[in-house]
Image (cartoon, rainbow, N blue to C red):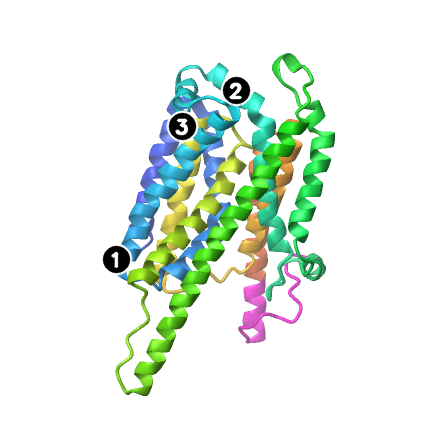
Amino acid sequence: MVLKTFGWSFAVTALGLAAAVFYGGWTAFGIVAILSILEISLSFDNAVVNAGILKKMNAFWQKIFLTVGVLIAVFGMRLVFPVVIVAISAKIGPLDAVDLAMNDKEMYQQLVTDAHPSIAAFGGMFLLMIFLDFIFEDRDIKWLAWLERPLAKLGKIDMLSACIALIVLVITSMTFATQAHQHGGAHVDKTQTVLVSGILGLITYMVVGGLSGYFENRLEEEEEAEHEAEEAARKSGKSVPAVVMAGKAAFFMFLYLEVLDASFSFDGVIGAFAITNDIVLMALGLGIGAMYVRSLTVYLVRQGTLDDYVYLEHGAHYAIGALAVILLVTIQYEINEVITGLVGVVLIAWSFWSSVRRNKRLEAEGGDGEPAEAVAGV
């Protein structure tokens, strides 16, 4: 079962890591491995959400999501999107960006370095909004309850996440941007660049969130209509088939999944810039990670159950928050890429360990509900 589901992921991993060694030696091997783990850890909750929605779709649309969707996710967001980011930030054509990345690495590296303040501000704000919206939402299951409970109460204030993000952006632009380094170590005022890029990151998050909300609302309307039809059939004595989405409902579900997947892959791509500016290593690492996320989605669907480790989603979002801070700090200061990658791994491992402890405690208590005080991890 595992080999059948993850076979392609194992093959892509072997090829990708081998390519990394040929491309840049064992240092490149390590960077690609870290990027793969980063992508998997940041997108784990995406796989769980995808599985919960995908199981409602019929076999045809499941196949579409797992074939066409893979092409969009792996080749579109993980390969093309980094090129677009560099091209826009450095104000060069996409083909020129690819050509420089392959044939003039020093110039490409310089262009990316010069564009880093705008990339970091854009990505940092996008990631920060994901993190803030998560921690300000009141959830039944809390990982670090001592922290999440008061934050959930604060989250009842409208637009709090956007306000805090904008305050962070202003502080960042006033403290880091004016000292951002450029050619020859000279000090260059990047305040306006950081402000504009950060605002664009905030707008992008709101657009993606708006599209996701739109598709989710359409799905809810379709599901409500199907439930009404199901209830009418039951009252009339007709047989009630299993609710499996098809047609227009499945199409909107597919679109919703692609928007959702794009938003999760976006934070992975942006987070990758905190680890490396090498577009080849970025593509290899994120591509491997994306394959595992898709395989995990299939595995969860075929198993017919969602993961029991309930704190992993929390760990992934705390990792996103840490990456947001790191990106903003790197506008001025350099942070070792190994440290950046390990932050996410440690948080995911901690949340997994907390989930295991919770499951053992529930088993010992003989119940299957959430304890009154969810204090795992403290």
Q: CA distance from mark 2 to mark 1?
A: 44 Å
Which one is closest to the eye, mark 3 or mark 2? 2
Predominant SS of the magenta segment:
loop
Q: Measuring 26% from the left and 60% from the top, which residue is drawn there?
A: 59
Judged from the image, the secondary structure of the residue bearing numbered disc 3 is helix
| Residue 302 image point, x, y percent | 33, 60
Report which residue position mark 3 lands on: 20
User: Which quarter of the figure has residue 291?
Assistant: top left
- Vertical comparison of 13 with 332: above or below: below
| Front residue of this view, candidates 199 and 69 | 199
Which mark, by number, is residue 60?
1
Image quadrant holding the N terminus, namely bottom left
Residue 359 highlighted magenta (yes or no)? yes
Instruction: Give how far across and how far down residue 38 sits, in percent.
Output: 50, 41
Q: Looking at the image, is 167 positioned above or below residue 256?
A: above
> Residue at 51% across / 42% down in the picture?
267
Query: What's under tag 2, amino acid-wise?
Result: Leu
Residue at mark 3 to residue at mark 1: CA–CA distance: 36 Å
Type of amino acid at the residue the image marks with label 3: Ala
Ranked by sequence position, the earlier of labels 3 and 1 is: 3
- Tell me the crowding category of disc 2: few under 14, some 14 to 19, or many 20 or more residues within 10 angstroms, Cα based: many
Q: Which residue is mark 2?
A: 111
Residue drawn at point x = 59 percent, y = 64 percent: 141
Q: Which residues are magenta?
A: 358-378
